[in-house]
Image (cartoon, helix red, strand yellow):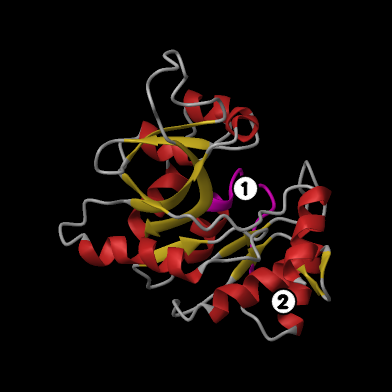
């Protein structure tokens, strides 16, 4: 499922921006299809503009309500009546989808015979302090089983002791859900930590869900700003 909201606060209509001959959302949809990992791929959007462009290429698209607070809420509405086990949330602004990393988070559920994992997601190591301290970069800390402890826009862990080595991880906004966890997300109200940080993954932690993080070294390019789009165009060529 690719949630695709037309408006975006930092870069309005970014999903319809041209990326070497095709809109960003079309590039993302085609990249998801080309991984060969999924039984079905859908774009879920509140916009007829996005819906039309996906329909024009013969893609699957579901129109959703406009007032969703997050991409996960939008996806939950779309899959509520579908007979599915695992739902992958691929962000519409990630045309450089990495099939190998997505395969790893799907594998989490295949190995989870006791069904203890509610979600799986991706994280990548980062070392540049400017990126670590950037509030637009969501960081995650994990336990010794690589299950998420917390997500934050602040640097976590805070470097109180400069002598202690610690790896900083950037959270990549790709989630794999058990359907029941996704339905719970839609039903459960937002709590203060999520509201404060504006990070939807925190809601799962606040309600006691288990999130398995998978490390990847493939960074890709998330198109959040016009500058990101310029980088994406250069990389695509």
Q: What is the spatial separation of the Cα atoms under label 2 and label 1, in whole angstroms?
A: 21 Å
Q: Secondary structure at mark 1?
A: loop
Q: Secondary structure at mark 2?
A: helix
* Residue corresponding to mark 2: 54
Could you tell me which residue is drawn at 76 percent across and 52 percent down?
228
Q: Please say if 62 is above or below 58.
A: above
Is residue 56 left or right of 190 when viewed as pictured? right
Where residue 207 sits: x, y (%)?
Answer: 35, 35
* Residue corresponding to mark 1: 68
Quadrant housing the C terminus: bottom right
Quadrant housing the N terminus: bottom right
Q: Nearer the viewer, mark 2 or mark 1?
A: 2
Residue 17 is a magenta residue: no
The answer, for residue 37, to whether it is visible in the render is yes
Q: Please say if 36 is above or below 101.
A: below
Is residue 86 left or right of 3 when viewed as pictured? left
Q: Please say if 35 is above or below 102.
A: below
- Magenta highlight range: 61-73
Is residue 236 left or right of 59 when viewed as pictured? right
Q: Tell me where residue 81 sits by quadrant.
A: bottom left
Q: Are marks 2 and 1 in contact (CB under 8 Å)?
A: no
For residue 55, the mark is none
Where residue 3 sits: x, y (%)?
Answer: 61, 59
Could you tell me which residue is drawn at 60 percent across and 37 percent down?
137
Viewer-proximal residue among 36 and 115: 36
Is residue 222 left or right of 100 when viewed as pictured? right
Could you tell me which residue is drawn at 56 percent across and 80 percent down?
34
């Amino acid at each position: 499922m690719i949630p695709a909201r037309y408006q975006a606060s930092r870069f309005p209509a970014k999903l319809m921006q041209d990326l070497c001959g095709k809109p960003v959302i079309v590039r993302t949809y085609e990249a998801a299809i080309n991984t060969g990992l999924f039984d079905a791929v859908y774009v879920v959007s509140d916009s007829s503009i996005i819906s039309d462009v996906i329909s024009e290429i013969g893609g699957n698209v579901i129109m959703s309500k406009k007032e969703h607070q997050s991409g996960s809420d939008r996806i939950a509405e779309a899959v509520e009546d579908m007979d599915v086990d695992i739902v992958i949330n691929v962000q519409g602004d990630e045309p450089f989808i990495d099939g190998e990393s997505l395969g790893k988070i799907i594998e989490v559920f295949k190995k989870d015979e006791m069904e203890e994992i509610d979600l799986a997601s991706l994280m990548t190591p980062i070392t540049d302090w400017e990126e670590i301290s950037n509030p637009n970069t969501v960081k995650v800390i994990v336990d010794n089983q690589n299950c998420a402890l917390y997500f934050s826009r602040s640097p976590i862990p805070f470097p109180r002791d400069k002598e202690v080595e610690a790896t900083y991880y950037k959270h990549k906004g790709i989630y794999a859900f058990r359907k029941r966890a996704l339905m719970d997300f839609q039903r459960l109200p937002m709590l203060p930590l999520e509201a404060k940080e504006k990070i939807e993954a925190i809601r799962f932690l606040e309600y006691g869900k288990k999130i398995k993080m998978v490390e990847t070294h493939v960074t890709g390019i998330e198109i959040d700003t016009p500058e990101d789009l310029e980088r994406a165009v250069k990389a695509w060529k």
